[in-house]
Image (cartoon, rainbow, N blue to C red):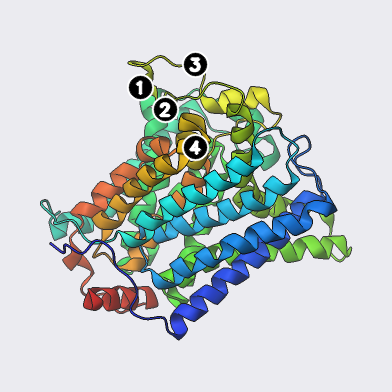
Amino acid sequence: MNDRVIQLEPGFGWRQAKLALLAYAQVVVCCISLYCITITDSFPGVIAFDKAHLASAIVNVLAFSPVVILFAISRFSFGYLVGFYFYIMVLGYLWLIEFSVLDYDHRLALASIVLSALAFLTPVLFITAPVRQAVVMPARAFHMMPSVILIASAAIIGIGSVYNLKLVDLAEIYKYRAELALPGVLRYAVWIVSNALLPFAFACFVASKRIWQAGAALLLMLMFYPIMLTKMALFAPVWLLFLALICKLAEARFTTILSFFLPILIGTILFFLVKAEVLPIKPTLVYFGTVNTRMVAIPSLALEVYNNYFSAHPLTHFCQINALKLVVACAYDEPIWAVMAKAYDLGAFNASLFATEGVASVGLVLAPVSALGCGLIIALGNRLSSGLPSQFVLLSAGLLPQVLLNVPLSTALLTNGTSLLFLLWYITPRSAFDQTAASTPAASEHLQNASAA
């Protein structure tokens, strides 16, 4: 077992400089995107654009932006993928807080989120040493498992369609989703299969160049949409295909940053083309709202809302975890997202670990401690997946950054299958990838990391 826990990229050369420059470009594009969102008054009653506060928002972002250097010097891992998305979420909050119209201690919130981000990123980026495999799946079983996942997924889709099967427009999904009544076991199965098992199968098929089976995995993901009525189910196949294509051209760290940079850049360009009356409003703003607003603004806005609410209401002390409600007193009888939906006119407002396990559970002062604990859990995923090709880890976890930005860590681990994915990484035979090593930029990066270690 490798007893070195903290690992860095050797030196700071041209590759690291390019990573840092690309990450800084992402910061700039996100700020422009957030500017577009704030000037259009997208969230009345929560934030309001004030030109006098524009300089403060820019200063906040500039002050935190050097953290991108951490992504330039660290190796790729599951935590790298998740950490970069959370880094952008924090930057978004540092921007939005300057236009906040809600009443809470904004200075304390600023200090808390910065410390929380640093406490979270340190373990998720730098704790990557492998855990010794006490149990390894036989290579034959591993080769067959993705096909078994496809068969099981098809069965779950068939059962789920008996309870709910509606092809509706995106604008109506919230109306019909409120009527969903899947049995508890089936509901868990749907979320775990769609967010963890099918992406894992897709990554296996891509690694072994079984293209038709990879396409079947994407098709099955899409078939969950009429059952779940979520944007994630609708766009997941496109997203994983997008990641797979970038992986063919760039190593995993560049793919991580580009996966955020390119969609947001396109949405920002489209926004200004609409403002210039070059493109029609409706289809263009549907893209901007779905990608730019949903990916960047909403997770950051959740911090704004949770900070406001829990500055004047009792903390949860983690009682949003259903199992804890059985043994400890809880001030809330409803899920936190339902509480937020009643308090703010923003719909069912789930939020990330920074908002739920942090702000809502322990408050602003102790939120960095909670973030550190959550970071150590993500770092466990790094260690359990260590030794696997970077491309495989990235694709099998491709949906989890979006999940983690929008639900508590406890929900992601259990309901969305993250803990099951950790287990699959742990028992995956590393020898299964020997034949395809160095066939892609991401695999080459994996080999370089292994030789450096």
Q: Image point 51% across, 79% down: which residue?
A: 18
- Any part of residue 352 in sight: no
CA separation, marks 4 and 3?
A: 20 Å
Q: Secondary structure at mark 2?
A: loop
Kind of residue sitting beneath label 2: Phe
* Residue type for callout 1: Leu
Number of the label disc, if any, that sits on residue 162: none
- Identify the disc placed on residue 331: 3
Image coords of residue 299 (percent x, y): 59, 45
Labels 4 and 2: the sequence-earlier one: 2
Residue that carries the numbered disc 2 in the rendered image: 318
Q: Position of residue 106 (x, y in %)?
A: 65, 41
Q: Please, is residue 328 above or below residue 267 in the view?
A: above
Q: Nearer the viewer, mark 4 or mark 3?
A: 4
Residue 220, percent across and down?
44, 48
Sequence-first tag of 1 and 3? 1
The residue sitting at the bottom extreme is 14
Residue under pointer 1: 324
Location of residue 6 with respect to 222 vertically, above or below: below
Q: Position of residue 302 (x, y in %)?
A: 60, 39
Pointer 4 residue = 365
Using a 10 Å C-alpha cutoff, classify the residue at mark 4 as few (fewer than 14 neighbours), some (14 to 19) or many (20 or more).
some
